[in-house]
Amino acid sequence: MNTEEIASIKQLLFTKKKIVIVPHKNPDGDAVGSTLALYHYLIKSNHDAVVIVPNDFPEFLKWLPGENSIIRYDAQTETCNSLINAADIIFTLDFNAFHRTGNMEPVLTESKGLKIMIDHHQAPDDYATYMFSDVAMSSTCEMVYHFIDMLEDTGKIDATIATCLYVGIMTDTGSFRFKSTTSTTHKIVAELIDKGANNTEIHNNVYDTNGYERLQLLGCALNNLKVIPEYKTAYISLSQEELHRFNYKKGDTEGVVNYGLSLNNVVLAAIFIEDKQEGIIKISLRSKGNFSVNELSRTHFNGGGHTNAAGGKSYESLNNTIEKFISILPSYNKALNDE
């Protein structure tokens, strides 16, 4: 964002506004953390703000301050439509194309509220009046911190806002181990701790709340792990029956794909999860080095994301989706083996 754009946003936010904040469908730690952080900041700035999520989010995020104020579009559609249509400003966080919000796409497309995008994914759509888009950023939460800083208002960041921002940065950087983590990221995290974010408590709340069935599901996933050494690739599959067997809840497969990537000599990892209710196979892809799973997902699996982390979907069966994945690996042979 340039100086003129920041000045314009400052002017917009100088007087009380009706503001809606929206993340992508199936919101993760960065999506929930960034929207709640911005919500608390805007409330402190005397705005009438609300977070509307397309659908439910994982249980391990439901301790975050303010999460009980979040409205689910799939549960309260009419209320959400009214709020969106009445909004002066709509912030879209952690996504850059309306289709990423699922059933919210039509009402967001038709809404008259001024759009402000804050996002770090590749290839943004041109729907927002103001776009803060930076693919080099570790997380949308880091971007929300920079956004508040550009507004010269970091003095409003308290323990509540700091906690929300810390969660998003921590989860989207893989606990600060991904290469998108920079010295600036660490400086911001240090400031968030100084402002009251309890890093030990946050980590425990997100990562150390496993139920017995979730660990059993992890065991099932690891038992299904396959390796294709000639293409430095590993993949995991979970059928709907396996999910039911271990009483799957949203968020239970978060991070499982990284086990495949942790193997020696593996550059590309994937997980394929059957979702019969939506009629799709959900796909998460991870990679090391310069191998772009964003490009692979956009080309073959109706998705996208970052160079080293992307998602996609398939409308074929679980077995056919895996067969398709394996069949395209030879075309990436050189890129995979060069890493």
Image (cartoon, rainbow, N blue to C red):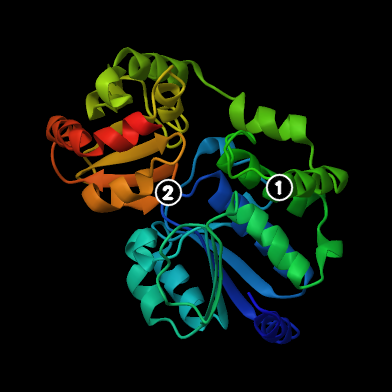
Q: Which residue is mark 1?
A: 185
Q: Identify which amino acid the numbered label 2 is placed on.
A: Asn
Residue 203 lies left or right of residue 305; in this view the side is: right
Q: Nearer the viewer, residue 279 or 150?
A: 150
**Mark 1 Cα-neighbour bin, 10 Å: few <14, some 14–19, many ≥20:** many
> Image point 62% across, 23% down: which residue?
208
Residue 26: which disc?
2
Query: Is the Cβ of the residue at disc 2 closer than 8 Å to that at disc 1?
Result: no
What is the C-alpha distance between the residues marked 2 and 1? 25 Å
Q: Position of residue 235 (x, y in %)?
A: 30, 26
Q: Is residue 255 above or below residue 303?
A: above
Q: Identify which amino acid the numbered label 1 is placed on.
A: Thr
Can residue 270 be seen in this snapshot? no
Task: Say which element carries label 1.
Answer: helix
Q: Position of residue 312 (x, y in %)?
A: 31, 46
Residue 9 lies left or right of residue 278; in this view the side is: right
